Amino acid sequence: MLEPNIVTIVAKIRCDEQPALERLLEDEIDPSTGKALAFHRLPHLHFASFCILDAVEDLPAYLVMEATFDGAPDDFLADLVEIADAQLIRIFTHCAGFPAQPNKDLLSDY
């Protein structure tokens, strides 16, 4: 039996990118639109979500992705990148430190 695990990714949103990221998540990643990430293809996934923490005073806005699943975190992340690399790249392009010319390997490193 696989052990339950959690992964939380917190990424600072680039200055002035929050509105575009919100539109992307609402219009193209929202399950109600039928364009959600292919989470259903991850057999050990229980729950996954994205949320945006708004900027407050001197703190910038952050994107938070969390997932609950069975198995090793590295295996889950490798499967996630394999299944949804193009969508993840579109999401994390709005975040600080994300490569300017991203690909699947750079996404995994990020």
Image (cartoon, helix red, strand yellow):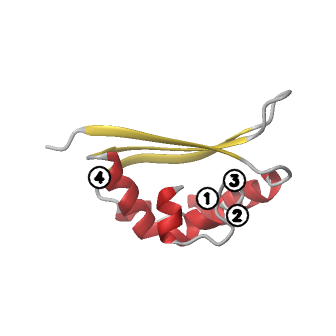
Compare marks 4 and 2 and give the one earlier in the sequence: 2
Disc 3 versus disc 2: distance between alpha carbons? 18 Å
Q: Residues within 10 Å of mark 4 (few under 14, many from 20)?
A: some
Disc with the residue nearer the chain's start (3 vs 2): 2
Q: Amino acid at mark 1?
A: Asp
66 and 92: which is toward the camera = 92
Residue 103, how many percent across, how many down? 54, 72
At x 71% / y 62%, what residue is drawn? Answer: 24
Q: CA distance from mark 3 to mark 1?
A: 19 Å
- Residue position for label 3: 95
Task: Judge by depth and name the residue closer to the eye, 53 or 40.
Answer: 53
Name, please, the residue furthest toward the top: 57
x 39%, y 38%: residue: 6
Helix, strand or loop under label 2: helix
Q: Quadrant of the N terminus?
A: top left
Around disc 2, counting alpha carbons within 10 Å, would you say few (fewer than 14), some (14 to 19), or many (20 or more)?
some
Q: Is residue 16 above or below residue 60?
A: below
Mark 3: amino acid: Cys
Identity of the amino acid at label 4? His
- Image vertical order of residue 68 relative to residue 80, above or below: above
Label 4 SS = loop
Residue carrying label 1? 30
- Viewer-nearest of discs 1 and 4: 4
Mark 3 / mark 1, whichever is N-terminal: 1
Q: First in sequence, mark 3 or 4: give its number.
A: 4
The quarter of the image holding the C terminus is bottom right
The reply to whether residue 35 is visible in this rendering is no
